Amino acid sequence: MVDIPAGLLAYFSDSKTEAAVDLLLAKQRPDVPDDVSWSDVPAYFRALRAARQIEVDYAILLHEIWSAVWKALPKPWVAKEPHEQVDDALLEPRRILGQNYALRAFERDKLRCELLVYGHKESGIQIGFNVFQGRASKLPRAVADWENDDGTYWSPANLVKLKRTIDLNPLRTYARDATNVIKSLDRD
């Protein structure tokens, strides 16, 4: 089980909160609205802080879910360190919030595997995985009970809903299945 912070839950469940946060985070340095007076500046800064907190809380949430659901791939797969990921920006909270996913990469020989966690207010929490050699997927064309999206396989949408406390057990079953599919590549 993982708990979602109240502010983040409000972001997912209230369209006005989502719009306000997205507006405040839309720019690196947001413009102060024309109707903000000097007496409103502290409240504006509080709103900006709250928006940035939601951004960071979301990045933390997806990485906590990753740690609770996925396990590191067994040898000969080698886990890539945070600074060795394909794109360092994938560890920026702003980018995680914008793309709705977090991932960790592993390598073996000339293969690269990504284990992902995706979260969205409409489709809930999903996990995904892929294995590529260059640009070519090394996974079978179809994997039972998974949704294929251009070589990345995803657990079903709405299997795990975004709510105050998230039960991750359904995703753990999918993570075990994905790991077995990845291990089967060693036998090929």
Image (tube, rainbow, N blue to C red):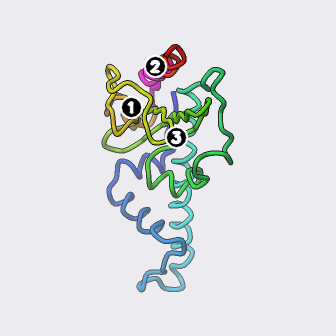
Q: Amino acid at mark 3?
A: Leu
Residue located 55% across and 27% down the image: 70
Is disc 2 placed on a helix, strand or loop? helix
User: Which numbered dot is residue 72?
Assistant: none
In contact (CB < 8 Å): disc 3 and disc 2: no
- Disc 2: which residue: 181
Between marks 3 and 2 in the image, the one whose residue lies nearer the viewer: 2
How many angstroms separate mark 3 from mark 2 (CA)? 23 Å
Residue 106 quadrant? top right
In contact (CB < 8 Å): disc 1 and disc 2: yes
Question: How far across and down, in percent of the image, does residue 77 sit?
Answer: 63, 26
- Disc 1: which residue: 153
How many angstroms separate mark 1 from mark 3 (CA)? 18 Å
User: Which numbered dot is residue 62?
Assistant: 3
Q: Which residues are magenta?
A: 166-179
How many discs mark residues in the rendered view? 3
Q: Residues within 10 Å of mark 2 (few under 14, many from 20)?
A: some
Magenta-drawn stretch contains 103:
no
